[in-house]
Image: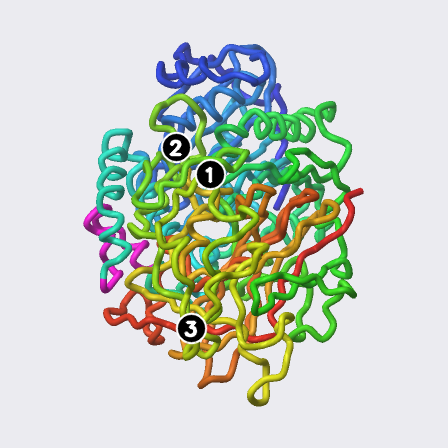
Amino acid sequence: MASHHHDAAARPAWTPPGRKPPLSSRMMRAIWRGLPDKRHDVGWEPGLVVPAADGSPLVTDHYFPRASGDFPTLLVRSPYGRGLPWSPQYGMLFAEQGFHVVLQSCRGTGGSGGAFDLWRNEAADGLATVSWLRGQPWFDGRLGTIGPSYLGYVQWALALDPPPELKAMVVQVGLHDPYALFYADGALRLENALLVGLGMAYQHRGIGPFARATLRLQRRMRDIVTARPLRGAYASALGDVPWLDDVMTHPDAGDPYWDGASLARAAEGLSVPTSLISGRYDALVDQTFGQYARLRQAGCDTALLLGPWTHTSAMQQGWPEVFAESLAWLRAHLCADPSGLRPTRVRVHVGGEDTWQDLDDWPPLSPATTTSWIPTAEGSLERRADGGLAGVCGASGGGFGGGVQSADGVRSGDGVGSAGGAGPADGTGPADLRGPSRVGSVDGTESANGTGPADGTGFTDGAGPADLRGPSRVGPAVGTGPADGTGPADDAGPADLQGPSRVGSVDGTGSADSTGPADGTGSANGTGPADGTGPTDGPGPAPLVSLRYDPDDPTPSLGGALLSRTAGPRDNGVLEGREDVLTFTGPPLDEPVDVLGPVSARLSVSTDTGYADVFTRLCDVDAQGRSTNVCDGLARLETVGQAPSEVTVRMSSTAYRFPAGHRIRWQISAGAHPRYARNPGTGKSPVEAVDFTPIRITLHTGCVLMLPHGSRP
């Protein structure tokens, strides 16, 4: 593309309008703390019309510094409207610091013409907006882009054919692959679909319509997520959302429906300096890691900030750090002022000890440092003495860059499981497991009270089942409770958590030891030796332990990769007390163990129906027995007869230190609802299925949890 010059002498004179930003934006801006002092007063030029390539009017607001001289321009394109929180969070804050900010509603939203499509128009509309910018008297040829979530997606769309004026990008908790947002290994991320549908369909209409739709979804969430069939059930709360029905009925990444949806290829040859910001529990963190890997391979100037945040809290509690990082990057590449840049390419928050670590790259460890942890029939978790992977199910280290196949044929590199959501940094937030929580604003960020910035993703985690106890587990038992106090500390769980053992042997016909091991390490005895590697009744891996998954009482989701305020780290004690949740726990650690990089699990599984999902989670058990989720993932599998099948579950990447005295726990179940749609157990589509059947899932010897261990630099 030919270069464009923007000589100040050649530009027509511009007389700034005298309007101030909206009062609501100024009020919200006034209550924020921990941000840099403003450098300029801010002016506002609302309601500009930018013609798209097909002539559709794209409604645009212009924020600018009230000062003489040239300033670079930031382009922010959003399907969520141009009001709160976008007006103060991007329009005002960055104009105060010396940037023109162009805040535009995507087509079909916020008054812009045309029809909204989840991804098909963003590249052309972005280029049309840059073409319009070239004719503005205040545009000096220096352009940057910024924004979170879908506002990151539109940046990648522009980067497919980057205009010469584009000098910097800041992608915050950003999306590039819609398929991976809605599916994990072919399993529908049901909650994501509903919450994104809510944000896309209603937020741009204003506070009133959005709030009413939010309340409808909150009240009807339980009925929607348990409807048979699931398809179309959302209409009772959201009305007709055609693209959402399309998303829910196209589970195959190779379906032509998804052609062109993934913009992973945009990073593969990009030379525009790009800053990436995410959190360890961000629902899109794996997409961020994939973006970083591609940019590094392309030789692009890039930086990565990984905080203790979720998709929502990054733009709320984390906003001072996110804003500072973003501002430093933009000043360095648009204003030739690198004074705010840190010396290293990567900065991560290390969970478990609440510290920040500067790194030269991500991941910091090689695959050779991945260690294997093996579950036993007694519920313990044993580290392989050689620390290697050779001979374990043919497993690899779950190497960085693995992921689902995008519809455009580009590996997403994002992994299957992603962690996200929202929650306090200490992971001690509430866990109302009996019903939906508040549904917030924007595409998932809670901002209903108008007191904090939001990326628009603060939604409810949905209405979980009323009882976390669930169906009985078929196989070895946990017994009456651990003797060392590793169960729920507040005794808030259901009464039967301390009652009779889970009845059944490995094959479901015998009885289990009702007392459980004294160290509280998990399931009680099975029929094999303690290491779970003994002889089998026939060829192939021996049965280890079983569970029974009942779709009528599905294992509920708790924390982890949600787009809601109830996501992130949570106390898993009550969840782990259910009969359909298996746990395997290691001994107290003699010294801290660092987990830095991609976590994965290799499972050998058989089922009695031939169809199942497997949800697997890494947890940290402290000295008081509190089990807190670190990262997780889900995979879909099919089995034939009684023979086990092998499946690898990518459990996202993390930066976490297990302190001395803590224990590493591996949690396994057959779902997390309504985070993921229920598997009907019949092979039918979970969206179309009317008939559901319980599933018995048996783990076999050869299962391994793979953790990237090592010392930090």
Task: Check residue 296 for magenta coloring.
Answer: no
Residue annotated with mark 2: 446
Mark 2, residues whose alpha carbon is within 10 Å: few (<14), some, or many (≥20)? many
Count of numbered badges drawn on the protein? 3
Check disc 3 and give the amino acid type.
Answer: Gly
Residue 614 in sight: yes
User: Where residue 351 sits: x, y (%)?
Assistant: 62, 40
Q: Which residues are magenta?
A: 228-246
Mark 1, residues whose alpha carbon is within 10 Å: few (<14), some, or many (≥20)? many
Q: Earlier in the sequence, mark 1 or mark 3?
A: 1
Q: Quadrant of the C terminus?
A: top right
Contact, mark 2 vs mark 1 (Cβ under 8 Å)? yes
Q: Earlier in the sequence, mark 2 or mark 1?
A: 1
Residue at screen point 46% across, 13% down: 16
Task: Check residue 229 for magenta coloring.
Answer: yes
Q: From this viewpoint, which residue is outermost toward the left?
A: 236
Residue annotated with mark 1: 422
Q: Residue 187: which quarter of the image?
A: bottom left
* 555 or 119, nearer to the observer: 555
Task: Mark 2 vs mark 1: give the one in front.
Answer: 1
User: Where residue 522 sits: x, y (%)?
Assistant: 54, 59
Element on which disc 2 rests: loop
Check disc 1 and give the amino acid type.
Answer: Ala
Residue at screen point 78% across, 47% down: 711
Structure colour scheme: rainbow
User: Where residue 291 sits: x, y (%)?
Assistant: 61, 50
Q: CA distance from mark 1 to mark 3?
A: 38 Å
Residue annotated with mark 3: 504
Is 549 positioned to the left or the right of 253 in the image?
A: left
